[in-house]
Image: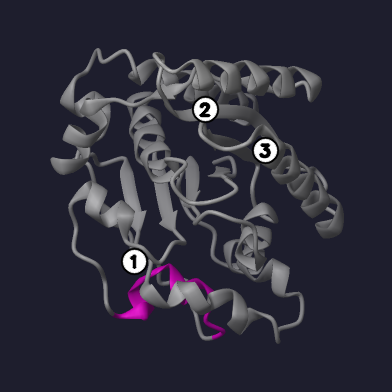
Amino acid sequence: MPKPLIFTSISKAGGASKTTLAVNLAYEWSLRGYSVGIIDLDSNHSIEEFVGIAPENDPAFTSLALFDPKFKGEYNFHQILGSNKVFLLQGHDEIEHLAESLYSRKLREFSLRKILQKYPLNFDLLIFDLPGGYDLITDNVLSVCTHLLIPVHIGVKTLSVSKLIDRVFQGFEELELNPEPKILGLIPTKYDTSSSTHREVYAALQEIAISLDFKCYPPQRYWRNFERAAMQGKALKQLVSNDPMGQVFAAVIDDLVKDFQLIS
């Protein structure tokens, strides 16, 4: 069996719909017949609220355990979305302080890589759901990633997007990654088609993507069905199978599937 693709999305701050992306991309991937594990590295429990499971209080049964020196590969994944191909390893409140606890370790940026190499997971795709911003945990995820996506809240200044991309490339260089993760592109989120400001920002993002030879995916719009699906613990396509916003997730998964088939 080939090694799994490992995917994450990185944003300047919270509110960029990374959890919505993680859940819906995972479900879309499962529709192609492949397995996926989501590892939540956020402390806000938003993904648990999304899929309708209770928070786990014992850190030994959460993603926090992966950074425990005593971890022995006992992953505690839960089946979610009513699918036998989609699983979640929950986050924990104390993840908020995880970066601080890693600073005293040697090779601290590669703690996660060490665990995944020693205790590999039997999924076709791993998705890491990160909080907003860039810190030591981001470096850990970058060190294992094969693919990443940059969701952009359409309300942010485009300059901050360029700065984030520069920081990601700096991370590649500092970590001496070879090969480097493949940046799939930018994906605008919270897009309002009736807003002239949003249209201007979207046009600017497309220009940034072209200048970097990135793809700019179709924007994820404000959409009531996203809220309805989350309230019911479902992915969008489980609620409305032909919802047009599902095409946004399908476009990203199309690109991931192409790369996965190359190594299969």
Q: Look at the numbered disc 1 and give the secondary structure of its residue.
A: loop
Residue drawn at 41 percent across, 49 percent down: 37
User: Which sits earlier in the primary sequence, circle 1 or circle 2?
Assistant: 1
- Compared to 225, does 112 lie above or below? below
Mark closer to the observer (1, 3): 3
| Amino acid identity at mark 3 | Val
Residue 176 versus residue 10 in the image, above or below: below
- Quadrant in which the C terminus is drawn: top right
Which picture quadrant has residue 76? Answer: bottom left
Q: At x 44% / y 18%, what residue is drawn?
A: 195
Q: Which residue is mark 1?
A: 76
Q: CA distance from mark 1 to mark 3?
A: 35 Å
Residue 2 position, x and y percent, is 58, 40
Residue at mark 2: 188
Quarter of the image for the N terminus: give it: top right
What residue do we see at 59% from left, 17% from top?
A: 200
In-image side of 254 versus 94 (left or right):
right
Magenta segment's dominant SS is helix
Where is mark 3, residue-wise? 161
Q: Which residues are magenta?
A: 58-69
Q: Where does the image place residue 246, in percent across and percent down from the top left? A: 34, 20
- The local secondary structure at tag 2 comes to strand
